[in-house]
Amino acid sequence: MKRTNILIAALLLFQIILRGQQKENVGLSPWGAQDQIGTLNMMTEASRLQVLSKISTGKSYDLSVDYFVGMPSFHSLGDPGYQYWLTHTPHGTIVDNPNGLGDGMNKKVSYTGDAISMYTHMGTHIDALNHFGLDGKIWNGFTPEEHLGDKGWKKTGAETIPPIIARGVLLDVANAKGPLQKNYRISAQDLQLTLKKQGIKLKPGDVVLIRTGQAQFYENASRYLDNYPGISLDAVKWLVEDQGIMLLGADNLSFEAFPPEREDNWVPVHTYLLAEKGVMFIEQLYLEELSKDKVYEFAFFAASLKLRGASGSPLRPIAFPIGPKS
């Protein structure tokens, strides 16, 4: 009996490895040749109304992080950090008199103006479907030769991402398993354990947010970026293929963990979700308050900036608990 169990375990392990290393191909959308938003097509007026009708309280949770100079961001490939500068200050306006109205007016009406510069994949943001592709194509077979101009993508740009209203589910893996080790890969089994402990089930069309616990270190960039845990390829395949989720998110920098699981792909989770399955995802969420209050099911609201042609955009997600009214 023991030998049989070992053989079964070995077979299951082999199937998991094989599943993770199968051929990668860009997906063609079941929503048509012109589809640019992938699984966000699962949202309907009826589905939005259904989740809105279940809001049980006026309490809300802000799931986004602050933007500030020195904030943690992906810089390994030379992408710029967040920059902020003042263009006008109350005293400077008096000295410079840029409006030509003189000391009296500028002393009475104080004026502050500012500007920012940033990478589109900073802070709480959503990845558009053009962010990563495979073999010269992005989701739905769009190509840079036909659809990428000097001012951005003509297909699947961030401006196409609709406002998102859906049932949200927090999978508090860091609470279910305890603090996660550096580079830990969250497995499908971890997600199933978390769901069981939380007493909740997933439904097709859900927005699933995964807490690794990394957001608690967000103010300390070196610790936040230090070999953080992330989700595994097997886990996202279980969520997408078996559970039918619509959108994913996590509280770490790049959703998946490094080093990559595949030798032939440095971001296999990214390409599986974006290029193969048309599933967008959110990075650098703030999930600590939801975890503290054990809010595992909620109405999820989010809207991104309509950055035409861009590969991602800042996002401001809000959660409203749903369930029996108290």
Image (cartoon, rainbow, N blue to C red):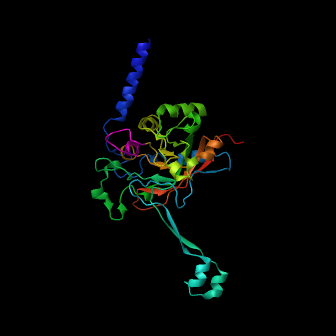
| Picture coordinates of residue 246, whole percent (x, y) | 47, 44
| Picture coordinates of residue 65, whole percent (x, y) | 56, 54
- Note whether residue 53 is visible: no
Residue 272 magenta: yes
Q: Which residues are magenta?
A: 258-273
| Picture coordinates of residue 162, whole percent (x, y) | 48, 54
Q: Nearer the viewer, residue 174 or 317?
A: 174
In the displayed structure, 70 sits above or below 232; it is below
Going by the image, does 12 lie left or right of 210?
left
Going by the image, does 269 lie left or right of 289?
left
| Picture coordinates of residue 249, whole percent (x, y) | 50, 46
Residue 167 occupies quadrant = top right
- Note whether residue 115 is visible: yes
**Extreme-right residue of the structure:** 326
Q: Nearer the viewer, residue 205 or 94?
A: 94
Task: Say how many tags the image has.
Answer: 0
The N terminus, quarter of image? top left
The C terminus, quarter of image? top right
Residue 312 occupies quadrant = bottom left
Which residue is depicted at the point 55% across and 52% down? 220
**Extreme-top residue of the structure:** 1
**Extreme-front residue of the structure:** 222
Which residue is depicted at the point 59% across and 76% down? 89
Residue 232 magenta: no
Which residue is depicted at the point 60% across and 44% down? 298
Of helix, strand and loop, which mostly describes the magenta segment? Answer: loop
